[in-house]
Image: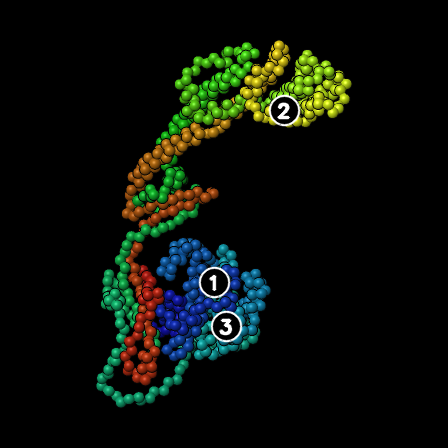
Amino acid sequence: MQIRDSGQIFNDSYEVQESMSGSFIHVNPLTTSSQQANYNEISSDLADYISNLYRLLDLRNDEGSNGIVDKIIISKEYLRKLCNDMVPSSFESISEIDYTELNSISFRLIGCYGNRNLIAKFLLSRNIIDQKLYDSLTASVSIGDTNQPSLRPGIYLSIVNSNLGLIIHWPEIGCYENASNDSSPIKRNMVNLHRYLTKLTDHQMCFMSDKDLENFDLNLENSCNNSDDDDDIHYRFEVKKSQEEKDDFKIDNGFKVNLSNEIKIEINNQMEDDVPLNPIVVESTTNQSFVTRQLIKKTWNLKRKTSYISAKQFPDDLETKLQDRYLLIDRNRMDMKALELFVKHGLKMEELLIPLHEKISAAKMRNKLKMIQEKSAIDEDFKIIQQMASIKLCVFESNFDKCIIQDSSLSQTNMSDTVFERIRTKYPEIENQIKKEIKINSKNWNIMKKRYNLTYTFIEDILEKVNEAGENDYGITESYVVKTFRNMFTDDETDLKKLLEKYTQQIQSKFNWTPSDSKFDKAMRWVLGDPNINKAKQKTKDKSDEEFIQELVKFELFKGNDDIKELIINTFFEEYNKWKKNDFPENLQKILNNTRNNKLIEDKLKREYEEEEKIIEKNMFEKICNEIEIKYKDGSMRLIVLNVKKSFAYFVVEYDIEELQPNQLQITIYETSLKEEDKLQIQENESHIPCPILLSNMNQYGISFRIDPQYYDFK
């Protein structure tokens, strides 16, 4: 095989070499330390800034046996980006590429080559690049300048749209200036890159100026005598006698490498299943490499796959995956919701779900009936609670018994103590809530209490101060005081201060009383002042309704005048009845509503239903899975359904698919490196036997990849 330096294509994990026959052999070479340095991406690379541009082939310098040579590199970084942009996750590693999905994408490719500036102008006109990128691409850059932003020579793919791609041969600086010099490395690089351009595209666009064309030798008169060999270059050789002729020859040892037992076993492989496994040595002066081959027998592998499909595609996609496979359902990852989606939309076997739906419907009906029964029981309980409230009211009304004949029907009940005890247990706070609500909080009741307390305090103090003064010259008789009490208590005035002033003025006016410094006058001024108002308010605040009513019943301010006492009690009892008729039922209803809105029973029944639903789904889930697996039991490989989700109009289905992995040929490339002392020894003594050391990456020796021996070979 004849290998040209400029005709080699490398990347950091594999190499493509073109043989004389035009076939391509995929190899995995070891890169030298100088190569690694050249592979480092620089920030001035314009390829990183051009949208939808991928570097396919990259022209790089490397160290060869005869010095620096040019090599054409395939960038794994851009290959990975291109594959994954076309089909997400299609490129896992160089040995794991989903060719099936990638081959489903069709592109029309058109090539272009020629003058850099003209190509850049074309890209600008097609809006592939903007003005700023155009200026950078056409800026004057010297060959050795790595700081100026530039696009490295090579082959690029620009995705124009979903159906069209542009393959760009971006040339070296000055490649057309030496076009007539066949031995020029730049010429060889140009020819090789153009060869790859024509292999990728059937049609190319040429962008050249008249000045570029002047550098080409277009004299084709003797073309018929030319050889078809692309590299038919004439060399001049001179042969000199270097040593005396000998009848035999001696083969010296080349090098010695310390290898592990595992590598030694690989080296000793020869042939298996008609596949050659003997090792291959890759010759080099300073970085000796060797290749081992190992046959990996066919195996069954589970691959995790996710399908994004519409409802229409779901059955067909499942049928395709089931070919020669039996179906299993992952009980740990699948739930009933996912199983229903799978059965209904994938298998189209909705009849399997009918028993499930019937059982769940029956459970719902039972729960609904329980809810009705519970609500009915609550309504009956509320009737009992209302009777409890009536009894509490009767107890409260008993405070009026001394003067008012009560309706005994309120206290009549057929309920036993057991029933009431059940209500207290079931509704532990209900009795206290009723007691709290038996509080006469009507506005008119409070006004009447304050007016009564003020009137009582006012009249009581007048009588007390008159008696203390020992003066009765003003004619303040008991009948007058009783009348004043009646009028003041029944007065419509709600403002206590105005009420007090009104009856103070009446007393002053009736008796023509003019204040003086007498003991009686001082006492009257105190009685008619604000302290009585404050005293009345405080008394109203301190006494509960029950205590207040008991005080009314014991009213003895005017002995022998029971009519005034009866008036007072009847007035308050009438207001109490208004409160009992209008306010108390609303207050009691609030208590009942709060008890019903507590939702304790609803929550309890909901939990019971959910527990029953879980049990039904658990039992039916296992039953449905078994029926499905019995129906789809034929096949030599497994298809395991992991999960099914619905996302808008599409389904996301996760599978573990078992696939047959045929025999694979594992190629492992080991690179060695000479120690500095060995390099010095070789320079001094060509017969020195060096001891190279194996290079490793993260304690891993060798770079491995696999190929199918039925279709590919490695030489």
Asked whether the beta carbons under mark 1 and mark 3 sit within 8 Å of each other, the answer is no
Q: Is residue 345 above or below residue 5?
A: above
Q: Is residue 227 visible?
A: no
Q: Which mark is residue 146?
A: 3
Task: Determine contact: label 2, label 3, CB under 8 Å.
Answer: no
| Between discs 1 and 3, the one toward the N terminus | 1
Q: Could you tell me which residue is drawn at 24 percent across and 67 percent down?
A: 261
Q: Quadrant of the N terminus?
A: bottom left
Task: From this view, report whether residue 78 is shown above or below residue 475.
Answer: below
**Which disc, if any, is residue 536?**
2
Circle 3 Cα neighbour tier, 10 Å, few/some/many (<14 / 14–19 / ≥20): some
Q: Is residue 94 left or right of residue 447?
A: left
Up/down of 704 relative to 678, above or below: above
Q: For mark 1, does the 10 Å Cα neighbourhood hold few (<14), some (14 to 19), or many (20 or more) residues?
A: many
**Of pointers 2 and 1, the one earlier in the residue sequence:** 1
- The kind of residue on which mark 2 rests is Ala
Is there CB contact under 8 Å for labels 2 and 1?
no
Q: Amino acid at mark 1?
A: Tyr
Point 31% across, 79% down: residue: 678
Mark 1 sits on what residue? 54
Tell me where residue 167 appears, x and y as whole percent.
48, 64
Q: Residue furthest left?
A: 247
Q: Amino acid at mark 3?
A: Thr
Residue located at (39% from left, 72% from top): 33
Please tell me whether mark 3 sits on a helix, a strand or a loop. loop
The image quadrant that residue 554 belongs to is top right
State the SS at label 1. strand
